[in-house]
Amino acid sequence: MNFNIKNTILAVVALTATIAIAQTTEEEENKLNGGTITLVKPYDPSISDAFKVKSNPTFSDTTKVKKKPVTYSIFSVPVASTFTPAKGTLSRLKPAKRDKYFKNYARLGLGNYVNVLGEFAANFEVDKDSDLGVFFNHNSSQGGINEVITDDSYSDTSLDVSYGQHNREMNWGITAGARYQGANWYGDYENTTNPITEDTDVGFNYLSYGLGGKATFFDGVFKDMDINLRGTTSSYDASEIRISALPQFGFDIMETEIALGGELDYLSGSFDTQGLIPAPENYSYLKVGLNPGIHLYGDHYKVKLGATVNYLNNNEASESDVYVYPDIIASYIVVDDLLIPYATIGGGLDMNSLQQFAEENVFLAPAVTVAPTNRLVDAQLGVKGKLSENFGYQVFGGYKIEHDRYFYNKDIGALFTAGVEAYQYGNVFYTQYADLNTTHFGASLSFDVTTAFNLTLNATGFSYEVQNGDSFNNVASHLPEFTADLVGNYQITDQWNVGTTLYVVGEREAFRNGVGAETLDSFIDLNLDINYKINPKLTAFLRGHNLTGGTYEYYLDYPVQNLQILGGAVYKFDL
């Protein structure tokens, strides 16, 4: 039984808070008509769209910095309004006409490096209680980075189909999806015994697929159910299957809200091709979990007191264990919306997977080690609030203890000269595991200068301590010391809109087995998005990526594309 009360108390005491933020203001749905080219619509859990294979590109032309999350939802859901208009006198001014909202759109963009962006989203109303949705995404490039010798092109294509139905008793939905990722291992080690040439074929691909369903019940003890089936294969005969179910129950005892969540997660995979650093040929894990919790509410406070209990069975090693984690969330309103301190103390057993690794870093070796991560403690203290109607903030500090945390490390390539494979030029990443303690401090600010102009700033600093990672000298490989982002949007006129994102990533150490740690430089990545609404249906856009220039490396030996310009159009329509 792994319940470390000492570590939990240590995490609470170690937390401190330092600077500022409010939550990023989400773009309103009607900004699609002449707004940014990214479709943003609040997720409505009444019709499920949560089970599709992720359609965001796994690796980017510019940076692996985590972008602002975007939820694609193509269902038309009415919103109830409690607003009652007051009676008034006649006015000579004509009321402003509200832009028409379209349920469907198509997007096409072309740019240098022969970058191609294509999207299509459509919603079909089967009847008054059900909808059918389709979402297609394609993002590709023919490459052409100056420093790269071999082919550096890539392609990322996904298709998702969803069906949802809602009635008075319940909402339910099913989604099926598939995603194809094709890329090249172009980031070779320059001092390898076997230098790579422009004719070397270093291509590979991943194919992912998924099928899932979700149901939400309005009455009774049974509240929600999520069931998902996901699979991943590679061109080097890697294979993985994952099945999960997440039931949720809720009821009241003596006017106290009780919640009980369950979890069943089965993961199994195999590798037929090995890289230079061997990995287990087969892996299989079964996780069963319970998450009971009590919710307490008052005029000024909210508290959740709970725990998470996980049973893990490692089928290949014939080993099993039980893990217990705290699950505590508390907030207290000191001064209305001005000052709200909060605290979270949690943990969990993270089921890492090949699909997850390929989404984070597609340049993996044909075989990597896949194992769960035990988050013994994951705690945070902070304060948030609004200094005015236009200015919000959040300041926080956190501490995390992880056992068997994965790191991305490289090798030096094959020492032999004959029969060198595409993945033996020191150009692939392996997963190696160690224990990691992380301390972080950060802040965020949100400015709504006007209804047409807003800015959000986020900044976080990190400190790492690695243990039991002797095979890679306890290096926190590829983990940044500092990250920051600035996101802004300016609706200049009804026709013109400009959006910008600025990403800053601090220095990182990257480990190469057989050589040691190398330092990756910090970088700044500026992106600009300009949109011009030609008419209610047609919007032209121009995107600039990595405007600060430079082929910096987020992953060791993998320079990104320099300044990129992409232009195109979005066409919105109803069927």
Image: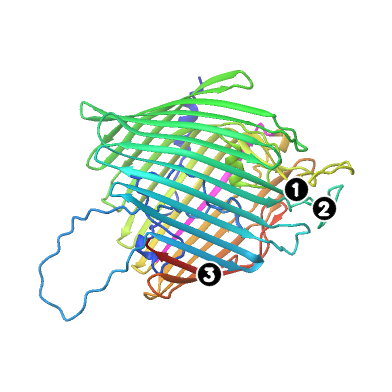
The answer to whether residue 561 is magenta is: no
Task: Inspect the image, locate mark 3, and give the three-letter code of the amino acid beneath it.
Answer: Gly
Residue tagged by mark 1? 427
Callout 2 touching callout 1 (CB < 8 Å)? yes
Cα separation, mark 2 vs mark 3, equals 36 Å
Cα separation, mark 3 vs mark 1, equals 34 Å
Task: Inspect the image, locate mark 2, and give the three-letter code of the amino acid beneath it.
Answer: Ile
Q: Residue at x 56, y 54 (%)?
A: 65
Q: Residue at x 42, y 35 (%)?
A: 345
Task: Inspect the image, locate mark 1, and give the three-letter code of the amino acid beneath it.
Answer: Asn
Q: Earlier in the sequence, mark 3 or mark 1?
A: 1
Cα separation, mark 2 vs mark 1, equals 10 Å
Residue tagged by mark 3? 568
> Is 152 left or right of 321, judged from the image as shown?
right
Viewer-proximal residue, 402 or 99?
99
Residue tagged by mark 2? 196
Viewer-proximal residue, 504 or 570?
570
10 in relation to 365, above or below: above
Circle 2 SS class: loop
User: Closer to the observer: label 3 or label 1?
Assistant: 3
